[in-house]
Amino acid sequence: MDLNLFLKVEGVELLNGTELFKVDPYGLVSVLPGVDIDRERTERIVIKAKLKVNKSSLHPKSFELCQIATAEILIDDVNDHSPKFTQKVYRFRIDPFPYNNTEVGSLRAVDGDAEEFGHLRYRILDEFVPDGHGGEEPLPFVLFQVFFIA
């Protein structure tokens, strides 16, 4: 028995996820313009796509073949949130003659990013030397993100 089976594929159709994605005639799935998918809200999306075929070219047994594909899309986090301090101003009192490595206070900042993009560390930029006038000194510090590489 000689069976010649060919299928005229006319494209790919998304069965779900059409509010987020589009698919071109060759099956390339891409995010629709203006869609913002954020890992903090969504970690993964499962979409299904089906071949669009010319029904007249279908062999009776073709419906036994798989025409639907499932794709799991895992959303990676990016550094899209700026760190924010929990207070606008921090004030600390320092003993005039402190011991070395004396803790005088702590700062707290939060970042909405997940995993390594949410880890924060900050430091004073230069050696801090009070000028002795006025009783208050602004601290020059930088806030930067720490990246852990495993």
Image: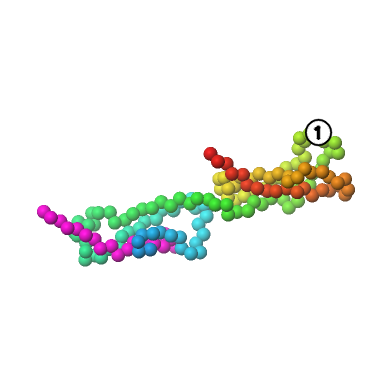
Instruction: Residue 53: give x, y in percent of width and height.
Output: 27, 63
Q: Is residue 23 left or right of residue 75?
A: left
Residue occupying the point 75% across, 41% down: 105
Q: Which residues are magenta?
A: 1-23
Q: Is residue 86 visible?
A: no
Q: Three-letter amino acid code at disc 1?
A: Tyr
Crowdedness near tag 1: few (<14), some (14–19) or many (≥20) residues, C-alpha within 10 Å: few
Instruction: Residue 79: give x, y in percent of width and height.
Output: 57, 52
Residue extending furthest front? 126
Instruction: Residue 125: give x, y in percent of width and height.
Output: 73, 46
Name which quarter of the figure residue 106 lies in.
top right
Residue occupying the point 58% across, 54% down: 80
Q: Is residue 35 visible?
A: yes
- Helix, strand or loop at label 1? It is loop
The residue that disc 1 covers is 99
The magenta stretch spans residue 67: no
How many marks can you see?
A: 1
- Magenta-colored segment: predominant secondary structure: loop
Quarter of the figure with the N terminus: bottom left
Q: Is residue 147 left or right of residue 129?
A: left
Residue extending furthest right? 133
Instruction: Residue 77: give x, y in percent of width and height.
Output: 53, 50
Residue occupying the point 38% across, 63% down: 24
Figure colour scheme: rainbow
Residue extending furthest top? 99
